[in-house]
Image (cartoon, helix red, strand yellow):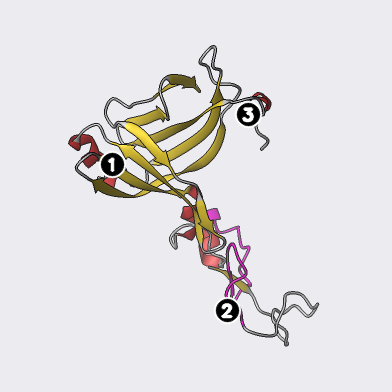
Amino acid sequence: MAMNAALEAALKGAAPLVCLLLQIELPGHTIRIIDGVGQVVFHGHTFNSKDPIYGTLSAVEDTSEQIGVEAPKMRMVLLPESEAAMAKLVHPTAQGSPVSLWFGAIDQITGHLIGEPELVFAGELDTADIDASEETTVIWFEVSSIWERLFDDNEGHRWNDAFWTHLYGSNARAFQHVTNAGQKLFWGYNGPSSGSGGSYGGGNGSIGGGGGNVVQQQV
């Protein structure tokens, strides 16, 4: 999706005032904070520089990913307001809480957002580490992308008749003639190298050369 035209124009201007808007939907409370000082209204909700319970956003690291073997991840740092808030943030019930991060620009005269902020990350809280020193205590969060769910063995659709009819009923016999499925189909990348020989295609209905049909199985 293309960036909002007004936001794009603002970013091309001289010294735009940019901001990050963070939303964490915890059980019983939603954190909506903006980096820096001040507040903005976005989608009918107010984002403040400090959450009265959970503190402020200290830093957000660049998103990282490895093609094919893991979903994108993001790390961020929160400065908790109290020990009680810190305990709630690292509690197991907080794991999996939806996280959204937007990038936007602020009109320096009105204090309002310019155009529509760009959603740069959507995911869920994964792990939390407390970093305590004499000066301050911070919490490092690792946030997994929503695509992390695709790597869960218990989610997704299996390519077999029993699972398909379990999902869609006895009339959905999409795989009733699929038997002896042995070839693995890797999601997101080409899978481990076989070393030599073999390629997709060839016109004889096989993978990797040779005779006989091979049915793919998703992993």
Q: Label 1 belongs to which residue? A: 138
Q: Residue at x 76, y 75 (%)?
A: 201
Residue found at the far top of this picture: 110
Q: Is residue 13 above or below residue 99?
A: above
Where, by quadrant of the figure, is residue 16 drawn? top right
Q: Which mark is residue 11?
A: 3
Q: Does 49 lie within the magenta span?
A: no
Q: Tag 1, which secondary structure?
A: strand
Choose between 87 and 176: the one closer to the eye: 87
Q: CA distance from mark 3 to mark 1?
A: 31 Å
Q: Which residues are magenta?
A: 167-194
Choose the circle earlier in sequence order: 3 or 2: 3
Residue 188 falls inside the magenta stretch? yes
Secondary structure, mark 3, is helix
Q: CA distance from mark 1 to mark 2?
A: 49 Å
**Residue at image point 52% right, 56% down:** 65
Residue 100 position, x and y percent, is 46, 37
User: Of callouts 1 and 2, which one flags the residue occurring earlier in the amino acid sequence?
Assistant: 1
* Amino acid on which the number 1 mark rests in the picture: Val
Which residue in the protein does label 2 denote?
182
Tell me, for residue 67, which label it has, or none.
Answer: none
Residue 181 in view = no
Amino acid type at circle 3 is Leu
Instruction: Point out residue 170 in the picture as x, y percentages from the top left corner.
Output: 56, 59
Q: Which x, y percent locates residue 214?
A: 66, 79
Query: Between tags 3 and 2, which lies in front?
Result: 3
Badge 3: residue crowd in 10 Å (few <14, some 14–19, many ≥20): some
